[in-house]
Every structure is written in C-alpha cells, then in structure tokens.
C-alpha cells in the first residue's frame, strides 16, 4: 500500500516548528551558536532566498509581457492601472489610520523603563533612509519609474522600472502584425510556464530553507528579549489579525469573495511568508494561484508585482504603530495635526521601496523626524523587529492576493466558473464546501 505523502504546507510547518526548537536550544549555547549560524543555518537559509530571487524577475517580465500583449488595449490597461493604484492607496491609508488608532487606544509604549530594553545598531539603515527622503519627492518618484538603463534595473532588482518596461514592451508587441507578434508571445509564454515549473522545483527546498531561517531568528534574539516589548509585539499581531479578518474581510465580502477561502488557498504560502519574513518567496505562487482561481493573466501579472511595492498593508500598519510606540516611549504626546502629518508622510515614503533591505526601518527613519520623534528609539525595537516582520509579511501576501480579485471583479473580468472549479479541485475542502464543477459562485 502506497504511503500518503505529506503536503508541502505540513512539511513547511514541521520545518518551522523544528527550526524554533533548534533556535531556542542554540540560544542557550553562545559559544556554539555563532558557528552553527554562520556555517550551517544562515547559508542554508540564504540558498532558498537566492533561489527565489533568481526566478522572480523572469516570471514578472514574461507574465507581464504575455498578459499585456493579450489585452492589447492601452486605454483598458490604463484603466486597470488607475483602479489598482486607487485601491492600493485607499487600503494602505486605512492600514495607517487603524495602526494609529490602536496605538493611541492601547498605549504600547507607556510605562516602559527604557533601561530594561536592549539596543541594536541601526546606523546601516540611515544612509538608505536619507536616499528614500530624497527619492520620494514627487518628481523623483516619477523619474524612478523609468529605467535609464534596463539592465542596471534588472541587476539591482528594481521592480517598478522593470514593470514599466515590461508594460510598454507588451503594448508594443500587441500592436505588431500577427505573424510577427505570435511567435514572440509564444516564446514569452514558454519562459513563463518554464519558470513556474522551476518554482515548483525550488519549493521542494522550502521546508529546509524555513527551518534554517527561523532557527537563525530564534537563536539570535531568544525569547527573553521579547518580554520587555511583549505589549508592542502583541498589539502588532492583534492589529494584523484585526485588519486581515475585519478590514480585508469586509472588502472581500463587498466584492463577492471570502478572505477565509483566500487564506485556505494560500495556506502554504502564508506559512512560508511568515517563516521567511520575505514576500518575494511567494510572489510567483500568488500569480499562479490567482490566475488559476479565475483572475485574468494580465491583471495577475500586473497587480501582484506592483502590489509588492505599493500595497504593503502589513508594513504600513506596523509602521504607524511603531511610530506612536517610540513617541510614547519618550513621553512625546503627538497632536492630531502631527499624527495627520505622520499619515501623509507614511503614505509617500512607504511606496515603491519594497526591494530595500530592512524596508520598514528605512521608512520609519525617513518618517519619524518629520514629527519630532527621536530616530534612536528604533534601536530599542530592532531586536524584535523580525518577529513582527514575519506577521506583517503574511498580511502583505493576503492583501495583494485580494487586490487581484478586487480589480478583476471591478473590471468585470473575474471568471466565477473557473474560480469555483479551482476551489473544487483543492482536496482538503472538496467534501465540505465544493459545488458541482460547472456551478458558478461568487466565492
């Protein structure tokens, strides 16, 4: 009798639990810890991150070119792009406001003795923050969308210029005569399908990558360092759960979807994103699954990569809470006007820099000074930032997947029958919630 193979979700979850256990054990052996991290665990984790980074750009370019060439209508594409940006701006602004409200209600930074808090050197983020402040002037933001050198943008992994070029190339390709257009579209289609196959190969390594990365995290900070900042960590997790189920749940319901179903579809990706604290690790799978769930290829390939720069719901939610936390830590009472300025500043600085390492720290460093909050306060929360980063990354994934469905429905292009067929094909849920294969559903 053939033994049932563990699903990838269970393999990743087991890797996560084992990684936490090994990391906690290493945390108690300081002499051996450094050797194991630098020579075994960190390289094993870095291999997985590099494998994912290797495939992201080819998938984005090939999927976008094929999708845009299929649309073939600049006006239609412009309308999709405008609706996407409007939706992103509304949802991320709501995330900022929710974070500010929760931080003002629960006061996570009040009553904490700063002498009990450890500090981490944040100087490496300051130079990048200065660049962000300069580059996020309106004119600079627009100019940065246009690559002066495509190959330099590819080498640096700058997603927005790559998207800009791919969209223009797709539009140019769609305007060619069929005998010139179709062979090239088939080439890009072949590249896209091949890279998705490569993604499935790489995902076999995911449990090992998750084990290694979570082990490094737990071994580095330990559980003891969480205690002084437990109120902040707890509030961030509560805020993320509230935003996911209440705010995104309401948005999903308004457009005829279920955020619970969405989370079930992405159970593997959510565990993976949470474990690695990297949205890039699941970007190819989000595109693939949303297309299978009934969203058009053009919308999937445009909205998902753009969302990773403009629709960071979890990150903006965290940034607003962290800003108020640091102000409360120093006993600074921000006025309504200062908090409104904080909202406006975060709306600008949080856009378009997803590829920057330590993105939330960079955004906060570029933001806090605008309302008179000491930048040094970030050093107190840097040690536990990874724990919060894991949760906000998972929320970013849910937010971007939902954005694809919202824009698809808004454009009247969502395929209900295809979505229901895909839902029925998921073995874990067929017995309870599946409908006949041809039956249409708004879920």
Image: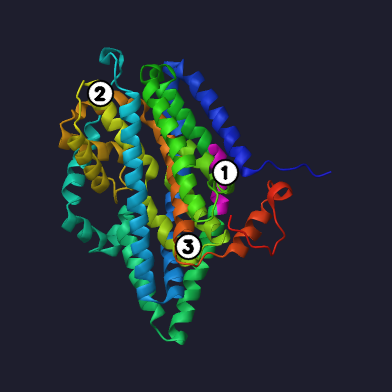
Q: Nearer the viewer, mark 3 or mark 1?
A: 3
Q: Main secondary structure of the magenta part?
A: helix
From mark 3 to mark 1, how far is it between C-alphas? 22 Å
Residue 138 placement, left or right of 440: left
How packed mark 1 is, by other alpha carbons closer than 10 Å (few <14, some 14-19, many 20 or more), is: some
In x, y percent, where is residue 64? 42, 66
Numbered label attached to residue 408: 3
Residue at 46% across / 38% down in the picture? 276
Q: Earlier in the sequence, mark 2 or mark 3?
A: 2
Stretch of the chain drawn in magenta: 200-208
Q: Of 103 and 39, which appears nearest the observer?
A: 103
For numbered disc 1, what is the local secondary structure?
Answer: helix
Magenta residue check for 337: no
| Residue at the disc numbered 2 | 328
Residue at 43% across / 36% down in the picture? 240
Q: Earlier in the sequence, mark 3 or mark 1?
A: 1
**Quarter of the image where the C terminus is located:** bottom right
Magenta residue check for 205: yes
Numbered label attached to residue 267: 1
Q: Of 345 and 127, which appears nearest the observer?
A: 345
- The reply to whether residue 121 is in sight is no
Q: Earlier in the sequence, mark 2 or mark 1?
A: 1
């Amino acid at each position: 009798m053939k033994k049932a193979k563990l699903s990838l979700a269970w393999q990743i979850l087991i890797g996560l639990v084992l990684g936490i256990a090994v990391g906690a054990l290493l945390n108690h052996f300081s002499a051996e810890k450094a050797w194991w991290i630098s020579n075994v665990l960190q390289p094993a984790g870095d291999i997985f991150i590099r494998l994912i980074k290797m495939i992201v750009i080819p998938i984005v370019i090939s999927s976008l070119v094929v999708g845009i060439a299929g649309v073939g209508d600049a006006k239609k594409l412009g309308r999709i792009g405008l609706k996407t940006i409007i939706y992103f701006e509304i949802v991320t602004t709501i995330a900022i406001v929710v974070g500010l409200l929760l931080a003002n209600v629960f006061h996570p930074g009040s009553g904490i003795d700063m002498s009990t808090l450890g500090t981490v050197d944040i100087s490496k983020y300051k130079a990048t923050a200065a660049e962000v402040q300069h580059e996020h002037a309106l004119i600079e933001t627009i100019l940065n969308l246009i690559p002066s050198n495509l190959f330099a943008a590819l080498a640096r992994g700058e997603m927005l210029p790559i998207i800009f070029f791919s969209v223009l190339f797709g539009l140019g390709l769609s305007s060619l005569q069929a005998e010139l257009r179709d062979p090239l579209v088939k080439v890009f289609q072949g590249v896209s399908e091949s890279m998705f196959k490569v993604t499935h190969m790489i995902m076999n390594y995911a449990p090992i990558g998750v084990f290694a990365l979570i082990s490094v995290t737990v071994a580095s900070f330990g559980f003891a360092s969480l205690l002084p900042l437990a109120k902040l960590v707890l509030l961030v997790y509560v805020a993320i759960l509230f935003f996911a189920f209440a705010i995104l749940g309401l948005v999903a319901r308004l457009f005829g979807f279920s955020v619970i179903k969405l989370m079930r579809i992405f159970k593997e990706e959510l565990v993976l994103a949470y474990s690695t604290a990297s949205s890039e690790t699941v970007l190819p799978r989000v595109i693939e699954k949303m297309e299978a769930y009934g969203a058009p290829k053009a919308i999937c390939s445009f909205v998902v990569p753009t969302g990773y720069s403009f629709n960071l719901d979890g990150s903006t939610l965290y940034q607003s809470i962290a800003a108020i936390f640091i102000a409360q830590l120093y006993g600074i009472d921000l006025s309504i006007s200062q908090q409104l300025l904080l909202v406006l500043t975060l709306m600008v600085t949080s856009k378009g820099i997803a590829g920057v390492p330590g993105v939330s720290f960079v955004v906060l460093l570029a933001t806090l000074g605008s309302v008179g909050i000491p930048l040094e306060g970030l050093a107190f929360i840097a040690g536990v930032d990874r724990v919060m980063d894991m949760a906000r990354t998972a929320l970013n994934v849910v937010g971007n997947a939902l954005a694809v469905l919202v824009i698809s429905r808004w454009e009247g292009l969502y395929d209900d029958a295809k979505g229901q067929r895909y839902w029925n094909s998921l073995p874990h849920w067929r017995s309870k919630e599946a409908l006949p294969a041809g039956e249409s559903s708004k879920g």
